[in-house]
C-alpha cells in the first residue's frame, strides 16, 4: 500500500495488531498481539483503509511506521520506565483491578498517574499526525481514557469515538480513583462513548453525575467548553463480537478438521475433553475451574483417562505482581492435580502456557466437549463466541459465567457463578450429562446469536453511533 500522509479513519489502541519480538540473536519478527481487542479490530480493519496508532510491544525507540494488511501502522514509543508506570502500573495495577470488581487490590501511585498522562498525550499527538481533516478517530480501552479530550483540544475538526473493551465499574468502586474527575473529563472529549453492556454505560453516566457534578439525561452527559458552549456526549452499549463467517469457514476446513482428530488421538481419545482458553489473568476464574475439577476428581465423579482437561493460558503481563502470584498458584495446582490423579501417559490436566495460531485454536474448540468460560468479571469474552462459532457440528457444551458480557447474549448456555464451587461442579456435570438433543438446541441458538451479531455489525453500529452523535457544540442557553 502506498504511504498516505493522513487517513479518514484512525484507530488508537495501546497495542498495534502486531508485536515486534526480538530473538536472542538480535533478529526481529512480528507476532500477532494478544487479546480480544486485536482479534476484533483486525477483522474490522480488513478491507477498510486506515491508520492504527499503537505501541509495538517492546520498550525503547519505536520502529518506523509501516504498512501491514492494508493498514498504516504508526508505532508509539514507550520507554522501559513508562512500560512499568503507564502500562504495568497505572493501566494494569490501578485501573484494571478497579474496573474488574477489585478482585485483587488496586495500587495508587502518583508517578504512575504522571506517566499515564504523558503517554496519553503522546498517543493524542500521534493520532493528530495521521488524521485527515474531519477524520473519524476510534480510540480503544482503558489505557487511553485521556486521549479523547487531548485530541479534541489539538484537533476540534475530528469526530472522536471511544470504546471500552472491559467493564466500566460501579460508581462506588470508580470513586476510589484519586484521578476520577480527570478520567471523566478525558472521556467526555469524545463525541460518542461505546461500552460492552448497558450497565457499563449507565455506570459511566452515573459517575459523571455523582462524582463530577455533570448534568445527565438518559444516555447523555452535557459538558461545557471553556468558551461556555455546551456539548452533549452519548454513552451507550454496543457489545463487541467476532468474525463469525471467517472463523466458521476456517473451522470447516479439512486441515482444521484433521487437526482436531489428531489432537483428540494425542490426548488418548478420552470420552470427555474439557477446555479452558484464556490469558493468564486473575479475572478469568482459572483457579475456580481448577478447584471445581479437582473436587470432582476427588469425589470420583469421573477420572482420567476417560476425562481430561486442557487449559491453554496465554502469557500475560508477566511482571505485574498479581499475575506472577496467579501463575505460581495455577501451576502449583496443575502439578498437584496431575500428581494425584494423573496416570502414566494420561495427565488429568494438560497445561499449555503458550500462544497458538488461529487454526490450532479452531481445532482445539472442536475437540472440547465442555468449554469452561468462568471469569469472575469480563467485559465480553470473545472465547465464548469463538467456541460456539467453531461448533458447526452442534456438538459440545458451553459453561459460561454470568459475570461475562457474553452471558448477556448467550443465555442458551450452561450458566454458572464461578464463586459457587459446588454450583460450578453441578453445572460441569450437567453439561456432560444433558441429552445431546438438548445440547444441540442450545448450541444452535448460541450460534444464531453470534452469526447475526458479528464483528462487522458491531463496528457498523459503533461508527453509525459516532456519526449520529449530537453534532457540534451548541450555544449555552441563557
Ligand atoms: P481478553 O481480551 O481479555 O484476552 P477475550 O476472550 O475477549 O479475552 O479474547 C481473547 C482472544 O485471544 C481470543 O480471540 C482468543 O482466541 C485469543 N487467545 C486466547 N488464548 C490464546 C492462545 N493461547 N493463543 C492464541 N490466541 C489466544
Ligand atoms: O480487552 C482487554 C485487554 O486489556 C486489551 O486492551 C488488550 O488487547 C488485551 O486485553 C491484552 O492485554 P495486554 O495488551 O495488556 O497484553
Image (cartoon, rainbow, N blue to C red):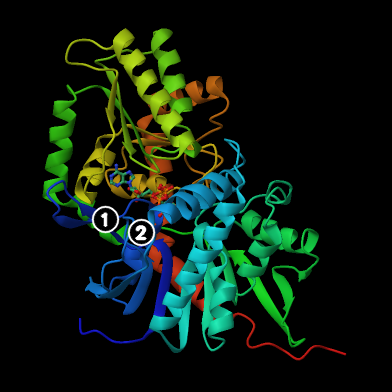
Q: What percent of the width, then of the height, locates residue 242? A: 37, 58
Q: Is residue 40 above or below residue 396?
A: below
Q: Is residue 339 above or below residue 152?
A: above
**Lower position in the chain sequence, tag 2 or tag 1:** 1
**In the drawing, does residue 33 fall left or right of residue 152?**
left
- Quarter occupied by the N terminus: bottom left
Picture quarter containing residue 234? bottom right
**In the drawing, does residue 325 fall left or right of residue 243?**
right
Q: What percent of the width, then of the height, locates residue 18? A: 28, 60
Q: What percent of the width, then of the height, locates residue 406? A: 49, 48
Q: Residue at x 41, y 77 (%)?
A: 10
Q: Give the labeled residue for mark 1.
A: 32
Pointer 2 residue Cβ closer than 8 Å to ligand 2: yes
Element assignment for label 2? helix
Pointer 1 residue Cβ closer than 8 Å to ligand 1: yes
Q: Is residue 263 visible?
A: yes
Picture quarter containing residue 199? bottom right
Between 330 and 398, which is closer to the camera in this rendering? Answer: 330
- Quarter occupied by the C terminus: bottom right
Q: Give the labeled residue for mark 2.
A: 38
Between 309 and 370, which is closer to the camera in this rendering? Answer: 309
Q: Is residue 448 visible?
A: no
Q: What percent of the width, then of the height, locates residue 9? A: 40, 80
Is the residue marked by circle 1 packed among few (<14), some (14-19), or many (20+) residues within 10 Å? some
Q: CA distance from mark 2 to mark 1?
A: 8 Å
Q: Residue at x 63, y 86 (%)?
A: 471
Q: Are marks 2 and 1 in contact (CB under 8 Å)?
A: yes
Q: Residue at x 45, y 14 (%)?
A: 295
Q: Is residue 1 above or below residue 90?
A: below
Q: Residue at x 44, y 61 (%)?
A: 453
Amino acid at each position: 500500500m502506498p504511504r498516505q500522509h493522513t487517513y479518514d479513519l484512525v484507530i488508537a489502541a495501546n497495542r498495534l495488531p502486531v508485536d515486534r519480538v526480538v530473538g536472542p540473536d538480535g533478529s526481529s519478527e512480528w507476532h500477532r498481539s494478544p487479546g480480544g481487542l486485536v482479534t476484533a479490530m483486525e477483522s474490522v480493519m480488513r478491507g477498510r483503509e486506515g491508520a492504527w496508532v499503537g505501541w509495538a510491544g517492546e520498550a525503547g525507540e519505536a520502529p518506523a511506521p509501516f504498512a501491514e494488511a492494508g493498514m498504516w501502522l504508526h508505532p508509539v514509543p514507550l520507554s522501559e520506565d513508562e512500560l512499568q508506570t503507564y502500562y504495568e502500573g497505572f493501566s494494569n495495577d490501578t485501573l484494571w483491578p478497579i474496573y474488574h470488581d477489585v478482585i485483587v487490590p488496586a495500587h495508587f501511585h502518583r508517578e504512575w498517574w504522571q506517566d499515564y498522562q504523558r503517554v496519553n498525550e503522546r498517543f493524542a499527538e500521534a493520532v493528530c499526525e495521521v488524521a485527515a481533516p474531519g477524520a473519524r478517530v476510534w480510540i480503544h480501552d482503558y489505557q487511553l481514557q485521556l486521549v479523547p479530550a487531548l485530541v479534541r483540544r489539538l484537533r476540534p475538526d475530528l469526530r472522536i469515538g471511544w470504546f471500552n473493551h472491559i467493564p466500566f465499574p460501579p460508581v462506588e468502586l470508580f470513586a476510589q480513583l484519586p484521578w476520577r474527575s480527570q478520567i471523566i473529563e478525558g472521556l467526555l472529549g469524545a463525541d460518542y462513548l461505546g461500552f460492552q453492556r448497558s450497565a457499563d454505560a449507565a455506570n459511566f453516566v452515573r459517575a459523571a453525575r455523582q462524582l463530577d457534578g455533570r448534568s445527565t439525561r438518559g444516555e447523555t452527559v452535557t459538558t461545557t467548553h471553556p468558551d461556555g458552549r455546551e456539548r452533549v456526549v452519548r454513552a451507550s452499549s454496543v457489545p463487541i463480537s467476532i468474525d463469525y463467517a471467517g472463523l466458521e469457514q476456517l473451522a470447516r476446513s479439512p486441515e482444521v478438521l484433521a487437526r482436531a482428530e489428531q489432537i483428540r488421538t494425542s490426548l488418548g481419545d478420552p470420552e470427555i475433553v474439557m477446555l479452558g482458553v484464556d490469558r493468564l489473568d486473575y479475572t478469568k476464574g482459572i483457579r475456580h475451574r481448577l478447584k471445581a475439577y479437582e473436587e470432582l476428581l476427588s469425589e470420583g465423579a469421573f477420572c482420567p483417562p476417560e476425562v481430561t482437561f486442557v487449559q491453554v493460558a496465554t502469557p500475560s503481563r508477566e511482571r505485574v505482581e498479581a499475575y506472577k502470584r496467579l501463575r505460581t498458584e495455577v501451576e502449583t495446582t496443575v502439578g498437584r492435580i496431575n500428581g494425584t490423579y494423573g496416570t502414566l501417559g494420561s495427565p488429568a490436566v494438560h497445561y499449555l502456557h503458550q500462544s497458538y495460531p488461529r487454526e490450532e485454536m479452531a481445532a482445539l474448540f472442536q475437540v472440547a466437549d465442555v468449554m469452561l468460560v468462568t471469569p469472575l468479571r469480563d467485559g465480553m469474552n470473545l472465547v465464548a463466541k469463538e467456541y460456539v462459532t467453531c461448533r458447526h457440528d452442534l456438538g459440545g457444551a458451553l459453561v459460561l459465567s454470568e459475570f461475562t458480557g457474553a452471558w448477556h447474549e448467550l443465555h442458551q448456555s450452561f450458566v454458572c457463578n464461578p464463586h459457587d464451587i459446588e454450583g460450578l461442579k453441578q453445572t460441569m456435570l450437567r453439561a456432560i450429562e444433558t441429552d445431546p438433543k438438548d445440547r444441540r438446541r442450545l448450541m444452535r441458538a448460541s450460534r444464531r446469536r453470534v452469526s447475526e451479531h458479528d464483528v462487522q455489525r458491531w463496528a457498523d453500529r459503533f461508527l453509525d453511533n459516532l456519526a449520529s452523535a449530537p453534532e457540534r457544540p451548541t450555544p449555552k442557553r441563557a
